[in-house]
Amino acid sequence: MAPTVSILLRRGELLPYKGDFYLWKYVPSMAAAVIFLILFLIASAMHTWKMYRQRMWFCVCFVIGGYLEVIGYGGRIGANNATDQLGPYIIQSVFLLVPPSLFAASIYMTLGRVMRGLGPEAERLSIVRVNWLTKTFVIGDAFAFLVQASGAGYMAAGTSAKTGEIIVIFGLVVQIVFFGLFVVAAIVFHKRYNARLGTFSPFDWGKIMKMLYITSALILIRCIFRIIEYGGGSNGYLLRNEWPLYIFDSILMLAVMVVFYIWYPNELQKK
């Protein structure tokens, strides 16, 4: 049997990283990680195909986010038999934490294109100038992305774990604030348009708005979960057990990719 296969099939055990410091509070499930790696790989490949076929280049951040999920679950697979190794831990920590920020970037750009696609009169109904709407939210999202990534890096260092948790929580709060403002902007625009220009619709923008609301809600729930998770500390229930991660992160982010694909904003190709 090849060495790599032998390592993958070996039963994992919880080992300390240094002295009595453990990176993990449990042995990550090989089966669960493999399943979600495959699911995210399929979803990412489908999004890549659709983005290329439809020339929807503003969705590239979304696609990258999907592949980062794949890498993250690859890290969890590697960690199953290497709970004392820093590399797999860092990979899964960073690459599973930051993809929602990339999903959000494409979601923000989608709303801006919806407004432009509905015409100049519709653009004036936005509470934020359309030219600034995408830039504002994407910049805020990028900031949250960088903060979370740096926090995850700190968490990988045993002595700086608490600092890393605080940084990650701050990044998640920033993301929630910007996402909340985005949802408010979307709802206000939606109501104003229906009240004043509801009879005019050059494309099925209602379908796209529905997709934006659902994906935004899923990402917000996931971010709230992550704040509670890190807020509970390294000895909290959520970080000591694996199942909450898959219920409140893995499944929700996979659902984001599925919903975005089903209600793909094809109509915005040239907006």
Image: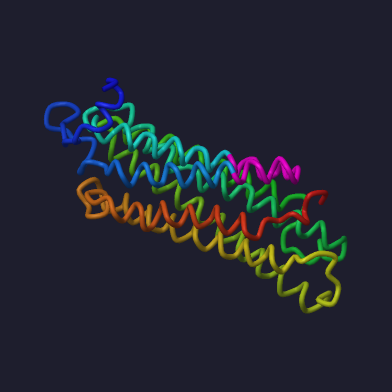
Q: Position of residue 95 (x, y in %)?
A: 44, 38
The stretch in magenta equals 46-63
Q: Is residue 52 magenta?
A: yes
- On screen, residue 16 above or below 129: above
The residue shown at (86%, 61%) is 119
Q: Position of residue 49 (x, y in %)?
A: 66, 42
Q: Main secondary structure of the magenta part?
A: helix
Q: Position of residue 217 (x, y in %)?
A: 52, 63
The residue shown at (50%, 57%) is 255
Q: Foreground: 97 or 182?
A: 97
The residue shown at (66%, 45%) is 59
Q: Is residue 165 magenta?
A: no
Q: Position of residue 165 (x, y in %)?
A: 33, 43
Q: Foreground: 2 or 217?
A: 2
Q: Quadrant of the N terminus?
A: top left
The residue shown at (81%, 51%) is 271
Question: Exactly how many numbered labels are in the figure?
Answer: 0
